[in-house]
Amino acid sequence: MNKENIPIIIDGPNYINRILDMSIDKDIISNQLSFENFRDALKIQLNGRGINAQLPKIEFVCSKKLFGSKSKKFIQIERDVMLERIMLEQGVHIEEIDLPGSQEKGVDNMITTKIESFSEKYKQIILITNDRDFVPLLSKMRKKETNIILVSLSKTVPKELINESYIIINLYNQYECLFNYNYPHYPLYRDFDLKKYREIVSNADDRVNNQFRVTTTGFVYLSYKDTGFKNILGLQFRYETYGAGNGYVGPVAASDSKYIEKGYKELMIAWKRKDSIPSYLGI
């Protein structure tokens, strides 16, 4: 069975705002947002609905404005780092709107133009937004018999959008697929601080089991390949395994400052007492 090419168009400001609504810190979004795992998650969702898809093209449409608002507003370098990084991913194009007046309306107009253009070539198009302003466009595409697959990152989706869409996919409870995970290793004996601890937690995928491990050479990391009693040779100590889906790791966990401070302090105490504590520590 041949796979169908389906383009993805993302309402950039709405997309970032919905992720900020998940209580994920903006610097984590800047450093870890990715479309690689996201594509895989979408393919699984589509396959479950009988659509065997390739997702080769992603159009991320935004204005020159900074993402977010008030205390959650990106600074310029956070915005630039994120966009420059994701545009390097295969098939991703950043469309920046720089027009006088309302730049957000310019984003809406560009998305409308792209969907109308794509509808001449593609039978199905994925639109990622939660914005009611697109209801007239979706209605027009429905009448034209172009299937708009609406993807939302919000707890609730406006019923007007649901009514005009061909399929609704809500990834709110699968936020983990929106990020990449680098699983860094850091030496505890050299300049290890709260920031690095937070980075370790943030760069671990909560969809799998994870375990904090400290080696006899003083390196700390989260392991997902080896957990529990697997391959423990060379470890000074390790923590109880964090079960998948329990929220101990990942961008949401790393955005909880009290949780991170507590975990960091406990790790540093354990490291100072490394010669007198058990090799296995409970959570």
Image (tube, helix red, strand yellow):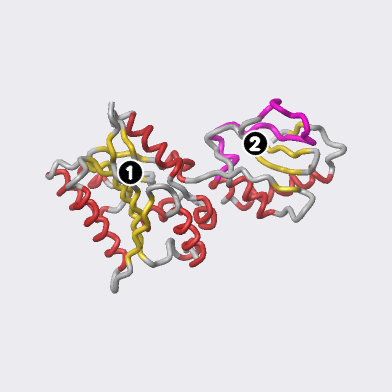
Query: Which quarter of the rendered picture does the N terminus lie within?
Result: top left
| Residue labelled with disc 1 | 151
Quadrant hosting residue 7 = top left
Q: Is residue 154 above or below residue 282?
A: below
Counting from the top left corner in percent of width and height, residue 250 is at 56, 43
| Residue labelled with disc 2 | 223
Counting from the top left corner in percent of width and height, residue 21 is at 44, 52
Which residue shows up at 72% across the image and 43% down it?
220
Counting from the top left corner in percent of width and height, residue 29 is at 50, 53
Q: Is residue 276 above or below residue 195?
A: above
Give the CA distance from mark 1 to mark 2.
32 Å
- 190 relative to 83 in the view: left or right: right
Where disc 2 sits, the SS reads strand
Which residue shows up at 74% across the image and 29% down it?
232
| Direction right: furthest residue | 276
Q: Bounds of the magenta span?
A: 227-250
- 176 relative to 92 in the view: left or right: right
Which residue shows up at 35% across the image and 49% down it?
58
Main SS class of the magenta portion in the image = loop
| Residue in front for this viewpoint, 25 or 184 | 184
- 12 relative to 2 in the view: left or right: right
Quadrant hosting residue 181 = top right
| Direction left: furthest residue | 143
Label 1 with label 2: CB-CB less than 8 Å: no
Magenta residue check for 112: no
- What type is the residue that disc 2 sits on? Ser
